[in-house]
Amino acid sequence: MKNSSFVFLAFAAVLTSSIFIPMMQQAFADHPEMRAETSGGTLEVLLEPSPQPIEDTESTQFKLTFLQPGTDSVQEHVDYDFIIIKGGQEVFKASVDTGQPLLHTTEGTVTIPYKFEEQGDHTVRIVMAGIRFIPIDPETAEFAINVTPEFPAGIIAPLVAALAFAAIPKRTSFKMK
């Protein structure tokens, strides 16, 4: 009896890890360090979403840092906008929420909260239009974001199967002496 319980637990552990661990690795692999040069090469933008993976049930904090090209030096006083696009349509534009034509970061780093309404592929577009209070031709940087469901649907069926297997009564054989 003890051996069959051990075999079942080992089977369940292997089944769960073979499904769940690759799914978690994929979710985190979708969001490597997100750093991109603006379209005109004036600055680089570092985008750090938190938490990861990004889920459609909780608010995401996007830490946005403007950097001087090829360095880790933060560029202060940047006029910008933060836009989220889904299926070619803008679903969020930070400047509209504030009632301003552009946003401004004095320190060069800002955190923007957003709660995704839908899962799937999104684009985060940063539009930069000024540095140190001097307007420039607008430059953009874009980042692909994949929003996942709160609980990965692909893991439900194997878990149900494992629980059903565990619930099957075990036959015991009695030996007569």
Image (cartoon, grey):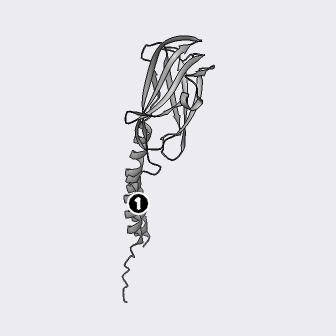
Residue at left offset 45%, top offset 17%: 139
Can residue 37 be seen in this snapshot?
no
Q: Is residue 45 left or right of residue 19?
A: right
Q: Is residue 58 above or below residue 7?
A: above
Query: Element type at marker 1?
Result: helix
Would you call the spot at circle 1 few (<14 residues within 10 Å), some (14-19), or many (20 or more)? some
Instruction: Name the spot of residue 43 as percent of width and height, x first.
Output: 49, 15
Instruction: Name the spot of residue 40 as percent of width and height, x first.
Output: 43, 13
Q: Where is mark 1, residue-wise?
A: 159
Closest to the observer: 171 or 75?
Answer: 75
Residue at left offset 57%, top offset 16%: 75
Residue at left offset 57%, top offset 17%: 78
Which quadrant of the rendered structure holds the C terminus?
bottom left
Instruction: Name the spot of residue 111 as percent of width and height, x first.
Output: 58, 30
Which quadrant of the rendered structure holds the N terminus?
bottom left
Count up the numbered dots: 1
